[in-house]
Image (spheres, grey):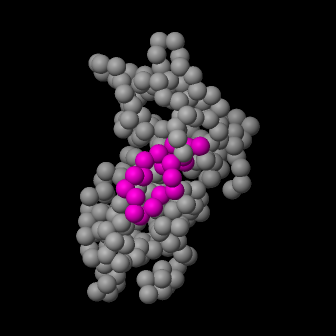
Amino acid sequence: MLELRFPPGEHAAALEQAEAFLAGRGTGAAQLYRARLVLDELLANLAMHGRFPPGPPPPVRLEVVAAGGVVELVLEDGAEPFDPRAAPTPAAPSLDDDRVGGLGLALVRRMAEIRDYRRLPGGRNRIELVIAAGPG
Amino acid sequence: MRFEVVELSPVANKVVLEGRLDSTTVGQVETPFTAAVAASGRSAVIDMGGLEFLSSLGIRLLLSSSRPVTRRGGKVVLFGVRPMVAEVLTAMALEQVLPMVATEEEALALLG
């Protein structure tokens, strides 16, 4: 298992480390892409929309597990409660529509199974995701 | 993340994308890419063959920079998209907005 901690919004190195960890455990190209995509979307979303209590934002905690051909990701953050399962599904993108929000979470739901969301004691969000090997 | 603009004709540019376009890199190219595509006054074919990774912020950039082109009656066509990038674009129904074809020739043919 890989465990990383980093400030919200500063996830570039964590994405590299997560990818290298998964690649080193024989994760296939498609699954690797989906894992990186899901992390990029959730961490970008947190950086852009996460509301934090006053003071320095508490670090994000990321857990990456590769076992039995399945990738498991756990993300914990100290932002206000946010359940990614409850976010509305956006309309399909269009060139005439400037509102292209919500694409990222829609992608997360297409590429991974959100196995669990809970609010941890002490006021942190915990999201658990699973990415099956799938085709490719 | 890098991109390069090649002038193909008085009415069309080719934009070559290379690297990863995600939340950690989009800021590096957002302004010059938008200027190159949106402000050129030309239609564009976008060479996606060297684009290894695309996330929703990259999709947003493709959409926002293409919008002014289509509003002027121009076209933006993507070609040579790698399989996983294509999966992301298709998952977001983007191929209905920005056509995706295999080769540069097909892309240029679509510009008409």
Displayed quadrant of residue B45:
bottom left
Q: Position of residue B49 (x, y in %)?
A: 49, 68
Residue B62: in sight, yes or no? no
Q: Position of residue A38 (x, y in %)?
A: 54, 43
On screen, residue B45 above or below A5: below
For image coordinates 71% across by 54% down, the residue present is: A135
Magenta stretch holds residue A91: yes
Q: Position of residue A128 (x, y in %)?
A: 60, 30
For image coordinates 45% across by 74% down, the residue present is: B77
Q: Provide the major secondary structure of the magenta segment.
A: loop
Outermost top residue? A122
On screen, residue B101 above or below A118: below
Number of numbered discs visible in the structure rendering: 0
On-image quarter of the N terminus of chain B = bottom left
Q: Position of residue A43 (x, y in %)?
A: 44, 37
* Magenta-highlighted residues: A90-109
Displayed quadrant of residue A10:
top left
On screen, residue B69 above or below A43: below
Magenta stretch holds residue A37: no
On-image quarter of the C terminus of chain B = bottom left
On screen, residue A134 above or below B47: above
For image coordinates 40% across by 76% down, the residue present is: B75
For image coordinates 47% across by 45% down, the residue present is: A102
In-image side of B17 versus A73 (left or right): left
Residue A27: in sight, yes or no? yes
Q: Between residue B74 and residue A18, name the one nearer to us.
A: B74
Q: Between residue B94 and residue A12, name the one nearer to us.
A: B94
